[in-house]
Amino acid sequence: MSGRILPVVFYGRKTLAVARDLLGQYLVRKVSGRTRAARIIEVEAYIGPRDRACHAAKGRTKRTEVMFGDPGRAYVYLIYGMYHCLNVVTERKEFPAAVLIRAVEDESGIIDGPGRVCRAYEIDRTLNCHDLTQGQLLWIEDRGERPPKSKIVASARIGVDYAGDWAAKPWRLRIEHVPQRRRTR
DNA sequence: AGATTGATCCAT
DNA sequence: TGGATCAATCTG
């Protein structure tokens, strides 16, 4: 099974459009000679220097630098000293924005939560800044399984209460028929 | 509800 | 250079 590797022009668009269009696409990971793929079912958008939930709102630092660069790169960071989160960089160069991959589905079932996705697919900071458009190590491809717009449900982003008004933006997108794990926060 | 865990960032 | 913070998850 294979599909069309998403090119730079896919990523270099408005972040919400990229986020929506990433749903149903396949995250593909090649590690030690084995290739695995998982369908993306939930994402979150982080959009620009004014979005207080976006790491780049704190400025351009070594960590956030990749978000200011070319679209189609991976932004991978360590959170709580234990888990990794995978984002894809969007928009034009110099405009910091990204889409967080929050949940996927593969033959083993649903992998819910960005830390679990990275753990299951062996994604860590060695892949930070990785070019997702080259079909090597890690990429995203279109297998023609994108959901209709009517099946996408939007809600507030998770774990960004510190972001004031920006926390309420409905920038978390999920394919609706996929059951959601209960969350207490 | 509380513990875990370490890189990062900024104020002391 | 220390210490608060954190796009999370696991165990109770």
Image: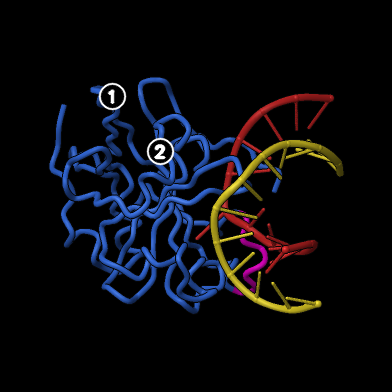
Chain colours: A blue, B yellow, C red
Circle 2 residues within 10 Å: few <14, some 14–19, many ≥20? many
Work out which quarter of the rendered image holds the N terminus of chain A and state it: top left
Of helix, strand and loop, which mostly describes the magenta segment? helix
Tell how many labels: 2
Residue closest to the eye, A68 or B6: B6
Amino acid on which disc 1 is placed: Ser
Circle 1 residues within 10 Å: few <14, some 14–19, many ≥20? few
In the image, residue A57 lies at what x, y percent? 51, 74
- Left or right, residue A78 beside residue A29: right
Q: Is residue A155 magenta?
A: no
**Of the residues under marks 1 and 2, which one precedes in the sequence?**
1
Disc 1 or disc 2, which is closer to the eye?
A: 1
Q: State the mark number for residue A157.
A: none
In the image, residue A23 lies at what x, y percent? 33, 47
Q: State the mark number for residue A123.
A: 2
- Residue drawn at (65%, 73%) of the image: A164
Q: Is residue A163 magenta?
A: yes
Q: Is residue A34 above or below residue A79?
A: above
Amino acid on which disc 2 is placed: Ile
| Residue identifier under label 1 | A32
Query: Which chain's residue wears label 1?
Result: A
Residue closest to the eye, A95 or A163: A95
Magenta-highlighted residues: A159-165
In the image, residue A14 lies at what x, y percent? 30, 69
Cβ atoms under marks 1 and 2 closer than 8 Å: no
- Residue drawn at (16%, 62%) of the image: A9
Query: Which chain's residue wears label 2?
Result: A
Q: Quadrant of residue A124?
A: top left
- Left or right, residue A10 beside residue A14: left
